[in-house]
Amino acid sequence: MDRQPTSNVSVDAIALRYNNETRHVEVGVSKRIIEPYIDQLALPGVTLWEGERLADAAERAVRTKLDLGVRALGQLTVFDEPHRDPRGQTLSVVMWAVADDPDEAPDYVQWHPVDDVPPLAFDHNQMIEFCRPLLVDRLWRDLTFTRALTGPTFPVSAAVAITRSLTGTAPDRGNLNRRLASVRGLGISHQRIVMGRGRPGTLWEWQSTHMEPESGE
Amino acid sequence: MDRQPTSNVSVDAIALRYNNETRHVEVGVSKRIIEPYIDQLALPGVTLWEGERLADAAERAVRTKLDLGVRALGQLTVFDEPHRDPRGQTLSVVMWAVADDPDEAPDYVQWHPVDDVPPLAFDHNQMIEFCRPLLVDRLWRDLTFTRALTGPTFPVSAAVAITRSLTGTAPDRGNLNRRLASVRGLGISHQRIVMGRGRPGTLWEWQSTHMEPESGE
DNA sequence: ACAAAAGTGTTCGACTTACACCCATGG
DNA sequence: CCATGGGTGTAAGTCGAACACTTTTGT
């Protein structure tokens, strides 16, 4: 693949991760080291190369800006406001991505809860705001997305926390349980997991290991 | 606005129209007059200019290729397969558009039912195939889309035909009636309209004249 | 009268929401 | 024993699909 940058298309990734400590779904942002908006936080984004696929560009963005690999990704929308980028780069394809767990985050990388992201460069805050409902829509429905976010197994507490974090309101535990039970490919492991205080919860596990590829483009 | 083409992004429009004669939702295609794929049919598409908005580009595509204005349009998806264009233009933003009624179509323009489109240039058939479910999803839900397609008033027969044409199967008249009744901004005009044979049908009319702008980008 | 087109009514199952109540564990 | 987290049950409301049946027109 040749490395000629196409001049006017950028690919920005909303890189997500479930933080088991804080119990939040977090968005990865990094401090920009080049102009414009140098030293400000921004979503990982790259300029699309000629012949490069969107998925590859998004992965490259997460790898170069957050120093992480991605488990899954997909297309969200296109932002086309003029003047969104002082360089004249008018088009940005926004992708979601679920990042690998970071062992140790570089100092220029930060993770913030989706519902509490600090001011970012460009129109990146608007991107997150606009795309959050789209992400909510994918939760427990788009299995590739959900599975990547939860990991291969997860306790009920994580399901509650992820749902609360994305939707903004705490889900009804009973209803969430029934919802999980109806998700294809998701089953109850007969291990129980203790979270400290309270009754031990079910551990859910994804069964079919093959990830369904997202149809499209 | 300057007219420098950006090298690698095209905007293709799935231009729709409800044909009251044939009772089909039709897609507008035009014979290409330049290479590549000269003389073959294709969706109206243009190369995005620098600083140009997607909506403007889509409108320009419909205007220049089909010689028509558009009533409404919106974003569908992005196609990014490499080699989809021999010129190396890898990215295409696919938009839907509802075109004005043609008084007389130029000879290079054809309209075909969505479920029976002839072979087109590039990957345009795949685009239509992939986007059709997205269009079905908008019908009777996205009011901008639906209103543009039906026009300000429409008989039941049109509602049935549009639904059948997009979904591929004939809707249940009773259910469709109730559905229409539940659409905000849509009401029953107390005129009845005679379609030739059969019982005269209700004429539906859109009330609030202000179009809700599509949120996004 | 009959076919074509339109309209009403009713049922069923799936899903969502809300809420009440029971269970198991740590301190 | 009680706060905390987890789980079951149930009922109301909404929605879509399916189907039976009636009404109004042209031929």
Image (spheres, coloured by chain):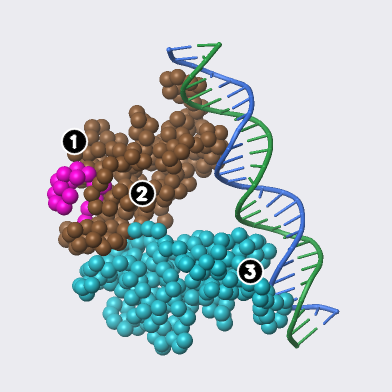
Chain colours: A cyan, B brown, C green, D blue
Residue at label 3?
A: A188
Q: Amino acid at mark 1?
A: Asp
Foreground label between 3 and 1? 3
> Label 3 vs label 1: CA separation?
63 Å
Disc 2: host chain: B
| Same-chain check, marks 2 and 1 | yes
Depicted B141 relative to depicted A40: above or below: above
Q: Which mark is residue B129?
A: 2
User: Closest to the observer: B50 or B19?
Assistant: B19
Residue A207: name its quadrant.
Answer: bottom right
Chain-order first, disc 2 or disc 1: 1
Residue at label 1?
A: B107
In the rendered image, residue D12, in percent from the top left (x then y), is placed at 72, 49
Judge whether residue A125 can be spotted in this image. Answer: no
In the rendered image, residue A213, in percent from the top left (x then y), is placed at 42, 63
User: Closest to the observer: B44 or A103?
Assistant: A103
User: Closest to the observer: B124 or B184?
Assistant: B124
Rendered residue at 31%/74% (across/down)? A46
Tell me the crowding category of disc 3: few under 14, some 14 to 19, or many 20 or more residues within 10 angstroms, Cα based: some
Depicted A140 relative to depicted D11: above or below: below
Rendered residue at 29%/64% (across/down)? A91
Tell me the crowding category of disc 1: few under 14, some 14 to 19, or many 20 or more residues within 10 angstroms, Cα based: few
Callout 2: helix, strand or loop? helix
The C terminus of chain B, quarter of image: bottom left
> Label 2 vs label 3: CA separation?
37 Å
Residue A37: name its quadrant.
Answer: bottom left
Q: Amino acid at mark 3?
A: Ile
Depicted C9 relative to depicted B215: above or below: above
Callout 3: helix, strand or loop? strand
Tell me the crowding category of disc 2: few under 14, some 14 to 19, or many 20 or more residues within 10 angstroms, Cα based: few
